[in-house]
Amino acid sequence: MKKPLTIGDIILIGLLVLWSLSAFLPRGERGRYVLIEAEGKPLGRYPLNGEREISAPGPLGKTHIKIAGGKVWVVDSPCPHKLCVKMGKRGRAGEVIVCVPNRVIVRVEGRREFDTITP
């Protein structure tokens, strides 16, 4: 015999649905700058609000990066799987695009950046 849902069951289900939908909300502040590193060395720091194309040299060749519309993304890379290209556009502080085979890191920076907060 089936038991009807109680008020507690409905509230719990509603909270679980809201919690799962929160994963789709944007997090963090909008980025202000893009820091690009190639082979462990800083290549440059560029404002995110401008429009620019950068070629980052790596051991496999050049990784082509584009900044436009407050976002940054990898347009093309000589790496075999193109995972960095598939990562899409990034524009929030703390977001990173990494091309491991070509040793290129694209990091979005904001006003405040903390890895750890210590007392």
Image (cartoon, grey):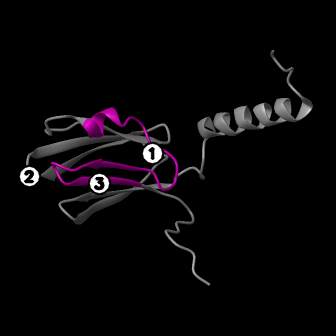
Q: Quadrant of residue 65?
A: top left
Q: Amino acid at mark 3?
A: Ile
**Label 2 vs 3, first from the N-terminus:** 2
Q: Give the image location of residue 107, x and y in percent.
A: 38, 55
Front-lying residue, 18 or 61: 18
Among all residues in the image, which is located at the extreme front?
1
The answer to whether residue 36 is magenta is no
Q: Nearer the viewer, mark 1 or mark 3?
A: 3
In the image, the segment drawn in magenta is: 83-107
Residue 13, horizontal then vertical, whole percent: 76, 31
Spatial CA span between label 1 and label 3: 19 Å
Local packing at callout 1 (Cα closer than 10 Å; few below 14, some 14-19, many 20+) is: few
Counting residues from the start of the chain, the first of labels 2 and 1 encountered is 1
Numbered badge on residue 105 = 3
Residue at left 52%, top 48%?
92
The numbered mark at residue 59 is: 2
Q: Secondary structure at mark 2?
A: loop
The residue lying at 44 percent from left, 42 percent from top is: 90
Which amino acid, by three-letter code, is at mark 2? Pro
Closer to the camera: disc 2 or disc 1? 2
Q: How many marks?
A: 3
Q: Residue furthest left?
A: 60
The magenta stretch spans residue 104: yes
Cβ–Cβ below 8 Å for labels 2 and 3? Answer: no
Q: Is residue 96 shown above or below 75?
A: below
Q: Which residue is mark 1?
A: 50
Local crowd size for mark 2, using a 10 Å CA cut-off: few (<14), some (14–19), many (≥20): few
Residue at 21% from the left image edge and 50% from the top image edge: 100
SS assignment at label 3: strand
